[in-house]
């Protein structure tokens, strides 16, 4: 089937998606569900390839906390080692026990009191070398905590759209025909305005005996809304203007379609444009279904209630095909 | 009346406001006076539904300070408890009194000296467990204050438009006809440039026996100004091009109109676009009135004086209706 | 003269500058040289009218440092007072001297050691009340320094255009006629791209016996440049399309012209749009002059040299008028 | 040759690049490889000419760390000097040794313990002057670290595009003719969307016996891509619409061409527009070559592999010229 579809689609295929039309160079889906490109970069050393900033913003909270704690502990251990080898007799207030562990622990506790600048003073440095190292350690302590303060803030203030997408996209009845539909809503106490949606469809078709990837921007019924107040059902009508007009359920599967979605909006708390991307493949298609409402007037009638657990609520419908 | 108005208005009603046309799903007003959508979200756990960032930026200064202080006190109490149960004989410099309160207080004061890293040292930790906990506490102290530093900055630097709107909107005489008018001004030492106003009117009308909400973008006499130097009176002429052209005072009330307003501008201190939203309902309408000036040359003639207390100063006028 | 000029100009006067056409409500120049509107706001309490953020960003470095130091000293004095009145016998390590000053100083130094969390410990708190206050003071200390950290960063990272304008604007010969010209350049190690200039002329003319202010956007020969690499001479040709076409030197003075200028550009270090505004009045006009070059090839021929001290270098020329 | 080329090109030369058409005022290349303008500014004092913010963001990590450390050490030394001259008998816990070095070191270590607020307390200030200085030093310590925290964050969070350009640009076969091509890719774990490329060509031609610099915006085959997912080869076809249509290899060299490139894109981690600039001169031209692919399906077929070390991989081809 792909062969006779191809010509009709060539008309409005675009080549400025940033993805390659060469299907044989492409591994797996183009983009992951979280919108990240399914790609790895090689050929430059790791330290050049990693933006600490991007990496730290991607980490989960637990991973981040543990990483910071691990670095704190390593710094502590290293300095403790130094104090131990210089000799803990240079730490006034400690007593040489002869046991490695006990002596090392005293050095370790002094180190941690210096690194955090708590400096109780019941242990204090004596002699030139120990004093210099203690001075350096407290400097490093303050610098590290300055860095961590910045990281905390960067993670904390990172503009994010907080959009939840319906796990499935539907082929639903629409104005006497069919349409592709998926639904989204913000799930936090944030409010987006001036939201724009952009949907690009990738289809894999045969051309001159080779599989090529073609990209079509999909026309949306509504591609801009003033306020993402409630949920937003994004609709691409499968009418005569659609490059997918004649696709059957099997065609969607055979062409291994992938829908690439970008939502951009303005968040007035971040006072910034926020963006979220996702992708749907044919595996996530429900052919013949319609979304059910996900909001209603509250019981007391004073506000509207948006039920986020219903974002994927749909009912199966017969599209009148066979 | 609504029935015969409906057809005339259908022409330019829009469906991309993000609000639902289904009046029966809508509870109360659409947006609150502070521009927040009158909506609650359910169906996801609280911790997923709350953006700490948005929540902290919404808090009043007092609430924020008290929250931080409460957390500080709780942390203090928890660690004090730990030191107490390990035994305050491991805190050198304290004396076992036998009284729970006195002993606990000594542990509490040591804890607070550790958490803030003040560490006087007249009380100091002895033994492995106490030392480890003290080391951990000072680490947690520094981390917490790093977090709080970030939060302070986020609250402090949050771009805000600082716009005050007149509490009422007027139906005022305008060029031989009538116009909807409201007034706004910045009330702080901020200066906005390239200000844009967008006004959408929601009216509730009968259609096929059901109440539906229709949305009309309102044409403004001036919708962009270069500099929000003085006050700005926003004017929607109720002329033949207006969807509300034939509305009487009673029609405004019957249709439960709601005007949704968004002001966007550039603040060159934040070097950012700032946005403020508000909404007016029919309750806030003054039918037949005109705004009085709110600025004048200063007494010494060297500057212009903007009198913010006059933002809602108007005088009643007869619109020549009956 | 103004009367016969007025009609010709009415054609393209604009009313969306945000300034009032009512000259009698206007005091002094519209905008100051630094671009701030020449305006004061009254009618709201000071604490509501001041945005701490805007105020702190406006302060000079010295004022800011002194303000912070003054607050630090006041906090210190207040807590010292508290410790003194509770009794410095509750500060172990101090000795009651009987002299108010000596006793107070001991309390003051303890207070400062607590507020900065340096906590040497040679003075330490004894008893419930003193301990609670010390605990509170170290908490306030850390909170204050968290705040100050944020303020430092806000001041430090505030996007700024760093543009220097020529102190004078010229009426210069241009393509056989005349043109208004002024010159600007960035004076720091910053680089602006995609720079846009917007110039609005305010003239005071007689209309129906009253002085009114009219505003004309001025057409510029080049209003956008890709890169603010060298200096930029902004040129408004006084040709037949200009609202000021027929103005003589005296007309400029009689109409008390004021040119309002906004430059917007992108700074890729701030990764942000930066904006700078200024204004010229007739007092800053040099009638009949031409700017001299302010850049040249360096002596070694390897780079271009931009001589900022020459930003206002011009030579007088005869415009052929009499 | 330049003479007969000049007329043809005059048609679409532009004068809003911000660079001067006067070749004799221009020293060396216009922009450096890192996109900075090849320009020095003089005529204002250094402290006015330097934006600390811009300077700190330009520094390498090592330079920055060493600078901070140097300042820390200088502060330490200055305060140590003060304590020494006041007399270290005012530092309780030290012992007057009579040796300058030993006494000074004790003062130095006390100073560093105060500056970092570690304050062990085995050395503590005695007397009014020493106490006041110590109080000041701990205040300065905290202020400095507040500043450094801000600087760390500014460096850390500076939006950057992380784009790598091919070191060479090619004149490659393209659709039966020729085209200028260069290639770029992001080399970190960042993802850019909505990328725009802008290319301006500077050529030096003879006009009326003088060398003038002319600037031509170059039309690109694709100047906008939705997602900078893989590499992006930027193509300017040397067809009849190109101002460089008839250029031979020698012409490119004789005209000392310089291509100025700006890439703008949106990074959703910074939630900001990022920009990177570069420039190519005739020395970086490879005449007659074609880029080889730099990405391929991974071995396990699950993702695409972008090989950054191949960004400049090309093969020589014959352009059929002689």
Image: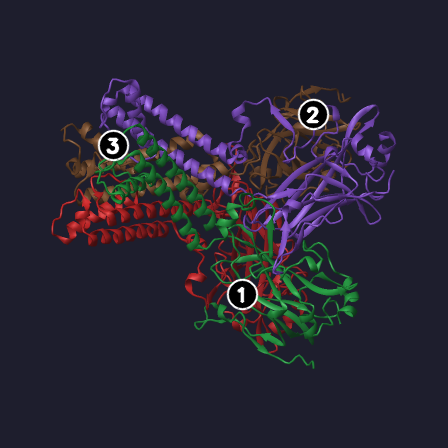
Chain colours: A red, B brown, C purple, D green
Q: Are the residues at dot 3 and dot 1 in contact (C-beta closer than 8 Å)?
A: no
Marks 2/3 same chain: no
Q: Which residue is mark 1?
A: D230
Left or right: B79, with C256 as reference point:
left
**Which chain is disc 1 placed on?**
D
How far apart are the alpha carbons under marks 2 and 1? 59 Å
Q: Is residue D190 left or right of residue C245?
A: left
- For residue B109, the mark is 3
**Disc 2 versus disc 3: distance between alpha carbons?**
60 Å
**Label 2 close to label 1 by CB (< 8 Å):** no
Label 3: which secondary element: helix
Label 2 marks which chain's residue? C
Residue B195 in sight: no
What residue is drawn where x is 40% and y is 33%?
A: C144
Distance between mark 3 and mark 1 Cα atoms:
58 Å
Considering depth in this image, is D102 or D237 the residue closer to the camera? D102
Task: Provide the residue designation for mark 2.
Answer: C27
Q: Which numbered marker is on residue D216?
A: none
Using the image as rendered, state which of residue C127 and residue A207 is in the foreground. C127
Q: Residues within 10 Å of mark 2 (few under 14, many from 20)?
A: some
**Number of marks drawn:** 3
Q: Nearer the viewer, residue C9 or A2?
A: C9
Query: Measured from the top left, where is residue A55 in percent x and y?
Result: 43, 55
Q: Residue at x 32, y 29 (%)?
A: D129
Farthest residue, direction left: A98
Q: Position of residue D184 (x, y in %)?
A: 56, 65
Residue A210 falls left or right of residue D108: right
Nearer to us in this view, D281 or B193: D281
Counting from the top left corner in percent of width and height, residue D90 is at 26, 33
Residue D31, compared with residue A230, is above or below; it is: below
């Amino acid at each position: 089937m792909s062969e006779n579809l191809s010509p009709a689609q060539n008309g409005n295929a675009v080549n400025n998606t940033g993805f390659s039309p060469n299907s044989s160079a492409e591994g797996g889906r183009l983009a992951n569900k979280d919108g990240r490109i399914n790609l790895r970069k090689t050929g430059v050393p790791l330290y050049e390839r990693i933006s600490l900033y991007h990496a730290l913003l991607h980490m989960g909270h637990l991973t981040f906390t543990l990483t910071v704690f691990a670095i704190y502990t390593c710094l502590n251990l290293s300095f403790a080692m130094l104090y131990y080898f210089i000799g803990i007799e240079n730490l006034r207030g400690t007593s040489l026990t002869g046991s490695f562990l006990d002596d090392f622990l005293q050095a370790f506790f002094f180190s941690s009191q210096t690194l955090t600048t708590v400096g109780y003073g019941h242990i204090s440095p004596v002699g030139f070398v120990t004093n210099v190292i203690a001075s350096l350690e407290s400097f490093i302590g303050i610098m590290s905590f300055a860095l961590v303060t910045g990281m905390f803030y960067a993670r904390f203030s990172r503009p994010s759209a907080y959009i939840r997408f319906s796990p499935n996209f539907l082929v639903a009845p629409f104005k006497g025909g069919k349409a592709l539909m998926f639904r989204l809503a913000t799930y936090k106490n944030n409010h987006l305005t001036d939201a724009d949606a952009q949907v690009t469809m990738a289809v894999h078709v045969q051309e001159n005996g080779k599989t090529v990837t073609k990209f079509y921007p999909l026309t949306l019924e509504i591609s801009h809304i003033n306020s993402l107040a409630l949920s937003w059902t994004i609709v691409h009508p499968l009418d005569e203007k659609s490059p997918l007009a004649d696709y059957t359920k099997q065609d969607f599967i055979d062409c291994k379609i992938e829908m690439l979605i970008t939502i951009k909006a303005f968040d007035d708390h971040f006072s910034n444009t926020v963006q979220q991307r996702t992708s749907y493949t044919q595996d996530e298609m429900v052919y013949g279904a319609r979304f059910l409402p996900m909001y209603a007037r509250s019981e007391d009638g004073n506000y509207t209630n948006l039920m986020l657990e219903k974002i994927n609520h749909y009912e199966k419908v017969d599209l009148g095909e066979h």
